[in-house]
């Protein structure tokens, strides 16, 4: 490992040591000190507050919104860059930040992206249930499920309990009857 690579690794370890939790924080701090001694790098070099442009990838519009929110949380500034290269499929947002802030952004974005995915799964269950998006007897291939009921446990049970709560607060709407091929009922 070169001195530059070690300095980059030390910046990431410093960010983890500052913002990590429990054993994660302690082991990052130990490795940080060990590498500083091995490569004889001064802490002043690592903590240098040089602001540069860092690019972060995302996949969906929702992830883009989340990434922008994380930029704002870490840097406190509301202006960011959008990737304008030749490849339109590359979805990237740029943020002018320090190395330590870039590591923090990456860690927080990964954490919140997983949390968002988990919450959306529960919301979708509630949305389907609350709006009754299931086949009825008029469906061409309707088969009523007659299998055994299984017991939900752990994370799956938590997800379905949260979905039940979401379902209670959803605005339940039904599509217009004309949209689904039924005659409108006249009100008296």
Image: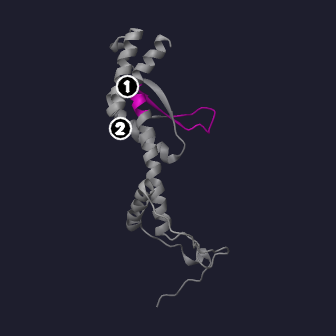
Q: Position of residue 2 (x, y in %)?
A: 50, 11
Q: Secondary structure at mark 2?
A: helix
**Magenta range:** 82-105
Residue 78 visible from this viewpoint = no
Q: Position of residue 111 (x, y in %)?
A: 42, 40
Note whether 131 is above or below 51 in the view shown. Answer: below
Nearest to the observer: residue 19 or residue 159: 159
Q: Residue at x 43, y 47 (%)?
A: 115
Give neighbour class at mark 2: few <14, some 14-19, many 20+ (Cα, 10 Å): few
Q: Position of residue 180 (x, y in %)?
A: 60, 75
In the rendered structure, does residue 86 fall within the stretch colored magenta? yes
Residue under circle 1? 28
Residue 39 visible from this viewpoint = yes
Nearest to the observer: residue 85 or residue 165: 165
Q: Residue at x 45, y 51 (%)?
A: 118
Q: Residue at x 63, y 35 (%)?
A: 87
Which colour style is shown? one colour
Note whether 122 is above or below 131 in the view shown. Answer: above
Residue under circle 2? 73
Q: Is residue 138 left or right of residue 13?
A: right
Measure the C-alpha gap from mark 1 to mark 2.
Answer: 23 Å
Label of residue 11 in the image: none
Note whether 25 is above or below 4 in the view shown. Answer: below
Displayed quadrant of residue 157: bottom left
Nearest to the observer: residue 135 or residue 143: 143
In the rendered structure, does residue 144 fall within the stretch colored magenta? no
Q: Nearer the viewer, mark 1 or mark 2?
A: 1
């Amino acid at each position: 490992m070169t001195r530059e690579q070690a300095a980059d690794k030390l910046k990431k370890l410093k960010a983890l040591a500052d913002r990590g939790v429990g054993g994660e924080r302690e082991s990052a701090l130990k490795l940080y000190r060990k590498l500083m001694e091995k490569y004889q790098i001064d802490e002043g070099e690592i903590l240098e507050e040089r602001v540069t442009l860092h690019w972060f990838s995302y996949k969906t519009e929702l992830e883009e919104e989340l990434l922008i929110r994380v930029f704002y949380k870490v840097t406190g500034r509301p202006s960011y860059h959008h990737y304008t290269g030749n490849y339109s499929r590359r979805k990237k947002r740029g943020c002018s930040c320090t190395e330590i802030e870039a590591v923090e952004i990456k860690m927080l974005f990964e954490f919140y992206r997983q949390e968002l995915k988990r919450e959306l799964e529960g919301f979708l269950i509630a949305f389907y249930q609350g709006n009754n998006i299931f086949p009825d007897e008029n469906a061409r291939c309707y088969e009523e499920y007659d299998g055994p009921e299984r017991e939900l446990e752990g994370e799956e049970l938590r997800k379905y309990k949260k979905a039940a709560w979401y379902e209670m607060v959803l605005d339940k709407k039904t599509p217009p009857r004309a949209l689904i091929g039924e005659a409108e009922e006249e009100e008296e």
